[in-house]
């Protein structure tokens, strides 16, 4: 194959044309490069040249290659493709594919795979795999692992591990550890620790500390602190501050502040703000609802919903959100045959009659709930601290006892005797602004697969048969 490479470099117009393009600074596409190599290796065999091109692009089958390449040639080709600029590594990969490598050669090849552009680090890894490294070499190798693209930082880490760093070097290393991909920020942190930064540099460093992975946002923050930002830049910075990890949401907020957002973009921005107040767990439920997952039922304000879980069904979830100041009523039943039913409503205090109507309607739609062996009600509602006139002690209870009694008695009238009622009062100001405030999640697995459980932003509990989950 080496002869093919040498011979084909002459007298191949297509290759000469491509070489001219490369020399002129024209960037070749991956397909052009593959075609070029195909003609280079097989100048007089269009079929083989085309096969090589297709193989580089990952389009060939083994059957196609078998007619033109021996197993050894295919292994050699793979070596050149993976390590085009490292003949030794290419040769080792060829031998590895053919099952000819020694233990020492495999260790050497691993070094090239991990550090393809760093011969020293590759050699150290080989020696480490073979158990030949000294303590000094292990420290040097650790430096390369942590800072593969920063020789200075790698050297400092090696010296630190060996206990050789000066105080100034320790400070410099700290900069690299905090900002491994930002040399300017790392240098500023080093200078700041040493007390050498100017006021402007301190401001610049503050930008990097707030936005370590966003140079544009860091620059805007620095300019804003110095009073240099335009109105457009202030709006852009506001977007980054509110949505530091969401470029799309940050851009929408910027447009909204500047009065440039369309109605559709405003609706999308509202969704981002809504998602921002929830944890990843709750946002995953939002994703399932939006994807139409039949096992996740969401109940919005002034609405109600119901689910049924038979012993052969998967776990189902019924949930609501933004309950702060509002009422949620969960009615749960379990039957001897294992069937589990749940009804959930969410209404404001001004719509209690509508809440009662919806509860009756949903229970009537599930007649079997009335004959259940377990009947439970959980009422989530605003609470308050009340002082006992006799004991003078304070206790936390529901704010509106009349509404609580009305909801509980209405459900009891519908389901009959044996209804357990739980009151879960909450402080309207409790955990204000925290993640997941106002959520009420109810997880209902099939009987035999675990207990029914619920959780709010301030409490949790279990329902139904108390069985251990298998």
Image: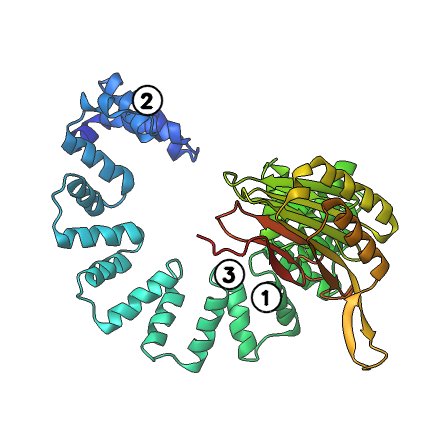
Drawn side of residue 43 relative to residue 450, left or right: left
Sequence-wise first label, 3 or 1: 3
Instruction: Find out whether the residues at labels 2 and 3 contact each other: C-beta distance under 8 Å.
Output: no
Element class at badge 1: helix
Residue 209: give its label: 1
How far apart are labels 2 and 3 at the CA level? 43 Å
Q: Residue at x 39, y 31 (%)?
A: 30
Q: Nearer the viewer, mark 2 or mark 3?
A: 3
Residue 84 appears anywhere in the view: no
Q: Residue at x 19, y 62 (%)?
A: 127
Residue located beneath label 3 in the image: 182
> In the rendering, at what x and y percent does residue 141 appear?
29, 65
Give the answer, above or below, for where 59 lies relative to 192. Answer: above
Element class at badge 2: helix
Give the answer, above or below, for where 198 lies relative to 378. Answer: below
Residue located beneath label 2 in the image: 14
How far apart are labels 3 and 1 at the CA level? 11 Å
Here the colouring is: rainbow
How far apart are labels 2 and 1 at the CA level? 53 Å
* Badge 3: residue crowd in 10 Å (few <14, some 14–19, many ≥20): some
Q: Nearer the viewer, mark 2 or mark 1?
A: 1
Drawn side of residue 112 relative to residue 71, left or right: right
* Badge 2: residue crowd in 10 Å (few <14, some 14–19, many ≥20): some
Sequence-wise first label, 2 or 1: 2
* Badge 1: residue crowd in 10 Å (few <14, some 14–19, many ≥20): some
Element class at badge 3: loop
């Amino acid at each position: 194959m080496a002869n093919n490479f040498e011979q084909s470099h002459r007298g191949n117009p297509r290759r000469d044309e491509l070489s001219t393009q490369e020399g002129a600074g024209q960037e070749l596409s991956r397909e052009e490069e593959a075609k070029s190599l195909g003609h280079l290796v097989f100048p007089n065999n269009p079929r083989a040249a085309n096969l090589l091109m297709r193989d580089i692009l990952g389009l060939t089958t083994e059957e196609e290659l078998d007619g033109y390449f021996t197993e050894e040639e295919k292994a050699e080709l793979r070596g050149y493709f993976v390590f085009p600029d490292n003949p030794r590594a290419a040769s080792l990969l060829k031998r590895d594919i053919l099952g000819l490598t020694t233990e020492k050669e495999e260790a050497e090849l691993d070094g090239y795979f991990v550090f393809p552009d760093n011969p020293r680090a590759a050699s150290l890894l080989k020696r480490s795999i073979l158990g030949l490294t000294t303590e000094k070499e292990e420290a040097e190798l650790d430096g390369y692992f942590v800072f593969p693209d920063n020789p200075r930082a790698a050297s400092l880490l090696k010296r630190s591990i060996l206990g050789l760093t000066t105080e100034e070097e320790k400070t410099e290393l700290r900069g690299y550890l905090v900002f491994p991909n930002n040399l300017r920020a790392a240098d500023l942190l080093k200078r700041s620790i040493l007390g050498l930064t100017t006021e402007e540099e301190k401001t610049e460093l503050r930008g990097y500390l707030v936005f370590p992975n966003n140079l544009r946002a860091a620059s805007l923050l620095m300019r804003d602190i110095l009073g240099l930002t335009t109105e457009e830049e202030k709006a852009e910075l506001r977007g980054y501050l509110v949505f530091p990890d969401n470029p799309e949401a940050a851009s929408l907020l910027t447009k909204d502040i500047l009065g440039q957002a369309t109605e559709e973009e405003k609706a999308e921005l509202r969704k981002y703000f809504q998602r921002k107040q929830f944890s990843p767990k709750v946002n995953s439920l939002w994703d399932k609802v939006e994807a139409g997952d039949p096992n996740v039922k969401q109940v919005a304000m002034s609405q109600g919903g119901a689910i049924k879980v038979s012993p052969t069904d998967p776990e189902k979830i019924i949930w609501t959100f933004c309950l702060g100041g509002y009422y949620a009523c969960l009615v749960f039943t379990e039957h001897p045959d294992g069937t589990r039913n749940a009804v959930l409503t969410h209404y404001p205090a001004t719509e209690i009659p509508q809440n009662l109507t919806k509860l009756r309607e949903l229970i009537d739609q599930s007649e079997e709930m009335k004959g259940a062996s377990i009947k439970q009600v959980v009422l989530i509602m605003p609470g308050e601290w009340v002082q006992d006139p006799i004991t003078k002690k304070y206790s936390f209870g529901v704010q509106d006892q009349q509404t609580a009694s009305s909801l509980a008695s209405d459900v009891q009238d519908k389901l009959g005797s044996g209804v357990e009622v739980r009151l879960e009062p909450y402080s309207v100001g409790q955990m204000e602004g925290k993640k997941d405030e106002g959520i009420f999640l109810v997880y209902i697995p099939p009987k035999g697969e675990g207990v029914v459980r619920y959780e709010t932003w301030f409490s949790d509990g279990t329902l139904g048969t108390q069985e251990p989950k298998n």
